[in-house]
Amino acid sequence: MIIKLDRLGDAVLSLGAVRLLIRECGSSSSLLVVSPIAEPLFRQEFPGVALLVMPPFCSRFWPDFVMAMTRHAARLRAIQTEQLVILRHQASDYLHGISSLMEAGEVHASLWEKTWERTALNYPGLHPVPYPEQSCDGCLELEAHRRIVQSVLSRHVEHHEILPALNDRPDHPMRTLLVCPMTGSEIRQYPAASLARALRSFIKAEPEMPITFCLPAGAPLTPWLQALKNEGIESQVDWQQPGDFQGLRQLISQASLVLAPDSAPAHLAVAMDKPGVFLLGGGHHGMFAPWWRSRAQTWLTHPMDCFQCRWNCIHPEPRCISHIPPDEVASALLQICYDLQIRRPSSR
């Protein structure tokens, strides 16, 4: 029994850990508790595993918490499991409420000292695993996954065993730069004007590479389109707004190069081992990113003394992102093109 109630990008980070646990424990005896936004990902990656879909978070006791518990209580009370594995490491009373309705012999959960919800780790049969303070191989979340899986399996688990990867064979990539500029919260986005300047520099060096902007369905094009117009490159950009997860996954799979801030598209691209440049702020720097599958991925940030602010920014704008120079972004993209030979046929 595995609980991973989270956003899509965080769900991607758990794929390697979930896959290893299911392989060791068996698909038929596993149950995944996941969020609606991550449901398509888990259904595609683990088609033989039963899913229970619930809201990822409850910010208010009423009506969110009470309604969620009421709606799912009967199903949760019917669950009996020898081992309950919680892969959302930021404990909450909501997760505790869900878990307390189940009959679990052992509970494996991270002991994250920064939680402010003090009942969240009062599980019977708890095997607490300290949340890491540092990691040599990637972000802290991956190291936390590794430690949890190691606790469940009672054996040493290597970093590569829990490294996220998608299960299908990738499409043959087209020679396209896919730009996914949006994140779940605007504070983590690279400014549209800076992004446009970076793309202008990139186009100057690689004028024949098609560029596609990928925005969520219903998201306004205006701020991005205006920034491109200001740089005189709007005619060189195509626009896509996939209406579902499969559409997003296909766009990333077909691209030869990806540019994105820290977001679900960024994590999907890295899990596919796509060449790309990813822009990372300091709010949770090192916690959910950076991470890599190969040298094809580059993460950029602007170092600041105020890193780890949890996005309670003390500046007029998030300088850890907004001050990444556009020329540095363009140079990183061009360097990947050069290193991996993602170039126009006439290039030497």
Image (tube, rainbow, N blue to C red):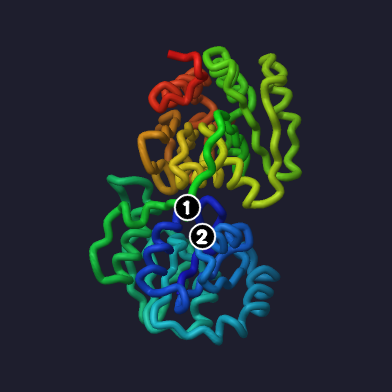
Instruction: Please identify the quarter of the rendering in which residue 307 is found.
Output: top left
Which residue is found at the position 42% from the left and 31% from the top?
304
Look at the numbered disc 2 and give the secondary structure of its residue.
helix
Does the residue at mark 1 contact the one at mark 2 (Cβ under 8 Å)?
yes
Which sits in the foreground, 285 or 341?
A: 341
Residue 284 visible in rendering: no
Which residue is found at the position 57% from the left and 29% from the top?
176
Which sits in the foreground, 154 or 343?
A: 343
Q: Earlier in the sequence, mark 1 or mark 2?
A: 2
Residue 331 visible in rendering: yes
Which sits in the foreground, 124 or 22?
A: 22
Q: Is residue 69 above or below residue 80?
A: above
Relative side of 66 to 47, left or right: right
| Residue pointed to by mark 2 | 45
Image spot of residue 199 (x, y percent): 58, 21
Image spot of residue 194 (x, y percent): 59, 23
> Callout 2: few (<14), some (14-19), or many (20+) C-alpha neighbours within 10 Å?
some
Q: Is residue 177 above or below residue 251?
A: above
Q: Is residue 114 above or below residue 101?
A: above
Relative side of 199 to 168, left or right: right
Image spot of residue 294 (x, y percent): 36, 39
How many numbered marks does the figure carry?
2
The amino acid at mark 1 is Leu
The amino acid at mark 2 is Glu
Q: CA distance from mark 1 to mark 2?
A: 7 Å
Which sits in the foreground, 335 or 194?
A: 335
Q: Is residue 122 above or below residue 267?
A: below
| Residue pointed to by mark 1 | 166
Which residue is found at the position 62% from the left and 22% from the top?
196
Look at the numbered disc 1 and give the secondary structure of its residue.
loop
